[in-house]
Structures are given as structure tokens and as C-alpha cells.
Amino acid sequence: MTRTWSRTSRAIAGTATALAVLTACGGGGDDTASKPNGPVTLTFWGWAKGSKDVVDAFNASHTDIQVKFEEIPSGTAGGYAKISNAVKAGNAPDLVSIEYSSLPEFVSSGALQDIGEQFTEADRAKLLPQSVELTTLGGKSWAVPFDAAPQAFFYRKDLFAQYKIPVPTTWDAFKKAAEQVKKADAKARIATFFPDDPTTFEAMAWQAGAQWFKAENDTWKVNTTDPATTKVTAYWQGLLDADLVQKDASFSPEWVGSLKNGTTIGYLGASWGAGVLKGNVPEMGGKWAVAPIPTWDGKPASGMLGGTSFAVTKDSKQKAAAVTFAEWMSTTEAGIKARIASGTSSAFPAAASLRPVAKKAFDASFYGGQDIYALFEASGASINPHWAWGPSTGTTNTAIKDRFGKIAPGGPGIADAVKAGHDATVAELTKRGLKVEG
């Protein structure tokens, strides 16, 4: 299976002249050794929960490499801008956290180094193929996958039971459940539409089978008018029009407050959301449970909402050491334990062999002792393999986010936002001199 994915990645990413910048601009660095020699000091920027705990554990157990960690804002909240500015100024850290969706943009700008010599095919074979696919561009390996982020539905099991509402397994059943929630409590809603977060909507399109970006021959094909996207757009517009979901910014005080007072009784998130929810409403332990994300036909299917990789910046002189540290974080029992034992992370490792370690390290008492990692395992296996990110995700998402914020009854809708994202993407790729269809 891994070999098939490798071939697929090379066929899709390696055949397009549109991706030439991914290899032409990528830095090579001065580090050609496969392993570091002597004491090395690395700088690492990231924002994920538990990152400092991981760095502390690594430093305590290693003398040949020491890591200086700087916590930065999450990527879209300013972290990516900070990384980009540091790269331009020539003072970027050695290693950075980059979500899968933003990796092609950093590669295409020449900000990163190819790490294929250090992060080998044998290393990649141990990881979830979908994660490896998302870090392989132009036939080269650009980052070490840390986790996958399969979708999940978090819900107030006490209120679902009180309102006698079955946990929905399909999107049709989800809409019916949403109507029942509103009927049971006029102020309550089953979930939230996040106007500030296009990635949640994109995960829904991904799950439904959409393929917004595709590199073919010498052309980028951009398609957001396919049946899957159209279906998801109409569905969520219908939920908004019928006032069946909340509309609050993701993880905002308003959103957290609605969870605490029972006016929002569900959260459509991803595996990492288990830690986020637990951290935001710790006093509600035992009231929440996790279910598979609803699907269109009732069969298992998932997109990926987020997911982190570790990439070496172009000017790092310590590539081998940086990859060694990245692999330790992603592929060792000690690294996974250090991140999850803090209690703030429910990361689902890309390394299959370490998922039992993650399960053991995460205190699931908040979810009544439910085996949430078994659910994540099944959801992870069902991630649609055909989605790929384009080289201008920042532009795409900014345009969509701007329009999402203006959605109002009788005014602009989700379809307008998706079209704006499409048009902005085509314009940006054209501006870069790339061939575009769409």
C-alpha cells in the first residue's frame, strides 16, 4: 500500500511543470551528513499543545542535540507570517511546524529543504500513507508527518439522551437531529458553523469526495464546482438558513460559553479536538462522547482537518539534526508520550505503531473512559486519499474566510465564498506564471 501511495504521489506531483518551483526553489543547506556530528543546538518554532513538554523531554534525554523552542501563534493566526518573514530575513529557525494544507505554499516559495536523504522511504513506510502523500511534492520529501487529523463528532451524550435524539450516522440524520435539538431547546443547537475557519468546511468537501487541486502535466486544475463541493455547500447553507447551527468564531469565548451553558451540544472537529474540548470545558467531564463523523451514505469516510508536519527551513545548517529531532517527536514512544502526557493533546500519530502509546497516554476519563483512539483509528483509515492541497492555500482560505464572515440571511452565502476562493486562487497562480485551468 505504501508503494502505491509513493507512486501516486510522484505521478501527481512529479508530472506537473506547475510544480517546478517546488524543486527549483527548495533550499539545499550545507548539511549533507545523514547523522549529526558532535553537540548541535537547534531552534524550533511551533504552537501545538504539548510542544514544550516534548522539547523538554528530548533535551533531558539527549546530549548530542539540544533544542531551543519558541512558541508562536498558530499558523493562520500569525505563525505562518512570522515564519515567512524570518525566512526572508535569513534568520529562520532550523525546524518549523507546518500544517499539511500550508506545506505546498512554503515549498513553492523556496522556504524549505528537501529531506529525502535523511527521512528515507523506510522511515515513511511506517506512517499513514495519506500523511506521507501530503508531504511528498515534486517527487521529493519536504517534511516529517507528525499526525493525521481524521474527522470526528463530539457530542453531549447526556443531552442527546435527555432529548431522546439518536446520534446521527448520516448527514440526513444530522439535519433531522439538528431540528430535534432546536425543538427540545429553542436556544440550543447541534453544532457550529465557524465563519473564521475555512478548513472545517474544506474537510467536509474532502470527505464528500471533492478534489479542488490537481497538478496534471504542466497545469494546475482548480475545481470547486464539482458535485461533491456543490452538495456540501448546499447542505450547510440549508442548515444556516434554517437556523439549525450556531455561527461563532472557532474556539472563541462565545463558542466556549455556548458549550458550557448547553446551547451548543456538539462539535464537528477532528482527533485533536478531543484535547481541545477537554481543555476548554474540563468541568464537564463525563458529559461528552465521541462518534464517527456523519457521512453521506452511512459508510465510513473522512476528510482531514488540520494535521501537522515538521519541516527544515532553507537556511538551516543542521538538517540532519533537525530531521533526527523531528523523527523523535513523530516516530518514537518517548516523543509521543511526552506530548500527550501533558493532558492537553489528543494527537493521533501518523505512525501506526505508536497509536497504542497515544491511547495509553491520553486520559480519556473526560469521555467516560471511551476508547476514542479506536474510533480515530477507523476514521483515519477512511480518509479520502484523493485530496491534494494547492500552492496558494493562504490566498484561497483568506478569500473564503472574508466571505464567510459576511454570510447573512438574504445576503452572501457559502457558494459566494467558495467562488471567491476559487477566483482568488486562479488569479494568484496565474500571477505566479503557472498554467491554470478552472
Image (spheres, rainbow, N blue to C red):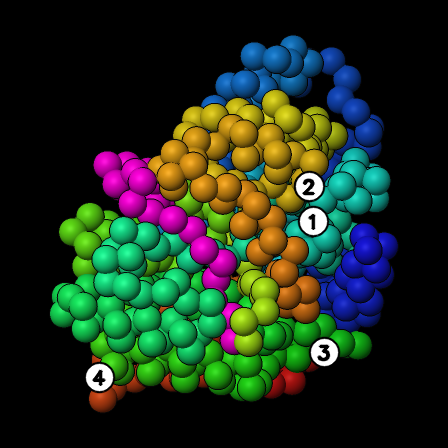
Tell me the CA gap for discs 1 and 2.
7 Å
Q: Which residue is mark 2?
A: 352
Position of residue 193 in the picture relative to residue 122 (left or right): left
Q: Secondary structure at mark 1?
A: loop
Q: Which residue is mark 3?
A: 219
Nearer-N-terminus badge (4/1): 1
Q: Residue furthest bottom?
A: 410
Position of residue 277 in the picture relative to residue 133 (left or right): left
Identity of the residue drawn at 40% across and 81% down: 235
Q: Is residue 58 above or below residue 349?
A: above
Query: Magenta stretch containing residue 370, yes or no?
Result: no
Nearer-N-terminus badge (3/4): 3
Q: Amino acid at mark 1?
A: Leu
Identity of the residue drawn at 75% across and 49% down: 141
Residue 227, how many percent across, how many down? 56, 86
Q: Amino acid at mark 4?
A: Pro
Nearer-N-terminus badge (3/1): 1
Q: Secondary structure at mark 2?
A: helix
Tell me the CA gap for discs 4 and 1.
42 Å
Q: Secondary structure at mark 3?
A: strand
Q: Which mark is residue 409?
A: 4
Stretch of the chain drawn in magenta = 276-296
What is the quadrant of residue 329 in the picture?
top right
Q: Which residue is mark 1?
A: 128
Q: Is residue 125 above or below residue 52?
A: below
Tell me the CA gap for discs 3 and 4.
38 Å
Q: Quadrant of the N terminus?
A: bottom right
Q: Amino acid at mark 3?
A: Thr
Residue closer to the observer: 250 or 354: 354
Q: Crowdedness of circle 4 by 10 Å Cα count: few (<14), some, many (20+)?
A: few
Q: Is residue 58 above or below residue 107?
A: above
Tell me the CA gap for discs 4 and 2.
45 Å
